[in-house]
């Protein structure tokens, strides 16, 4: 029943994300992100149990929120930027807390893809493999931001870079910040997943189809970027975002799918 709910929410995210495609209001954006939050909460509870899910949720959301508070007020990590009043929701310390909820679903699905590729869907992950999952998740999350940030900031104005930046108005420091942040909280999430309470759930065998909604959600987040120059306007900023979404953000998702569904395929090794 829970997995069916995940699939239903995934379908609703797809519908809300693509219609009306040409006029995405903040309300539509929040609807998609909030449904994604619920989807990942349910999925994570099936993977690691509710106690660990709440810990993972708090780590990703609060880490994302407070680093942005430091970013907005002290130019920490990301560079100089700010959130306009109202557009992104009520501000607390200069940052919209509700908008920061997106860190949880994005962080979770990137982390799950990392576990698929590096290994450890049903076992503890330690040492270099723990770091490997964090690096994979950070690369996946930062690549998403490369496809997404210029349109959302430069075009829609959901957040503003007053001094601009070389990449369609976005500074390179922002992407370095995303990589560092995601790598940091992915290690913490990995340690939470290694706990005894989480391993009671994680060690239970699960089919590859169990992990599919999380991977498809990552691809779904990229669909608007992919389609924007095709359905709306082939401007340079839209084409750049579309190209990255099509040919870069798909790499971690395709890698995860190949490992997930190819791990039990017959091997034909030649001596």
Image (tube, grey):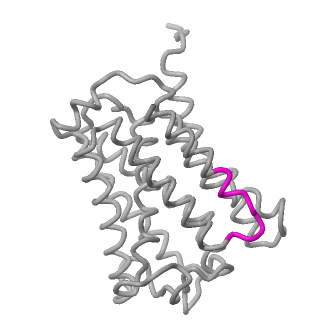
The residue that appears at 52% across and 36% down in the rendered structure is: 256
Q: Position of residue 68 (x, y in %)?
A: 38, 77
214 above or below 186?
A: above
Count of numbered tags: 0
Residue 234's quadrant in the figure?
bottom right
| Quadrant showing the N terminus | top left
Q: Seen in the image, is 77 located left or right of residue 229?
A: left
The residue that appears at 84% across and 69% down in the rendered structure is: 233
The residue that appears at 78% across and 72% down in the rendered structure is: 236
Residue closer to the observer: 167 or 92: 92
Of all residues shown, which one is farthest toward the bottom? Answer: 162
> Is 20 one of the magenta-colored residues?
yes
215 above or below 77?
A: above
Q: Position of residue 79 (x, y in %)?
A: 44, 83
36 above or below 172?
A: above
> Is 215 one of the magenta-colored residues?
no
Residue closer to the observer: 185 or 231: 231
Q: Which residues are magenta?
A: 14-24
């Amino acid at each position: 029943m829970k997995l069916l709910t995940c699939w239903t929410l995934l379908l609703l995210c797809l519908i809300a994300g693509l219609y009306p495609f040409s006029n995405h209001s903040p309300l539509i954006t929040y609807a998609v992100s909030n449904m994604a939050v619920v989807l990942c909460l349910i999925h994570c509870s099936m993977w690691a149990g509710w106690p660990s899910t709440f810990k993972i949720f708090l780590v990703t959301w609060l880490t994302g929120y407070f680093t942005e508070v430091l970013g907005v007020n002290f130019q920490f990590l990301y560079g100089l930027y700010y959130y306009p009043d109202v557009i992104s929701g009520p501000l607390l310390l200069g940052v919209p807390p509700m908008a920061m909820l997106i860190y949880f679903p994005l962080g979770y699905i990137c982390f799950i893809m990392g576990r698929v590729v590096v290994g450890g869907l049903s076992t503890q992950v330690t040492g270099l493999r723990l770091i490997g999952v964090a690096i994979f998740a950070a690369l996946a999350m930062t690549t998403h931001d490369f496809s997404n940030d210029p349109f959302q900031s430069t075009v829609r104005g959901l957040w503003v870079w007053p001094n601009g930046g070389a990449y369609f108005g976005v500074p390179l420091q922002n992407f370095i910040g995303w990589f560092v942040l995601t790598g940091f909280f992915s290690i913490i999430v990995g340690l939470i997943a290694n706990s005894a309470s989480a391993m009671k759930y994680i060690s239970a065998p699960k089919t590859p189809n169990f992990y599919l909604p999380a991977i498809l959600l990552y691809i779904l987040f990229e669909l608007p970027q992919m389609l924007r120059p095709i359905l709306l306007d082939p401007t340079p900023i839209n084409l750049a975002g579309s190209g990255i979404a099509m040919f870069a953000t798909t790499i971690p998702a395709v890698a995860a799918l190949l490992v997930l569904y190819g791990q039990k395929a017959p091997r034909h090794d030649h001596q």
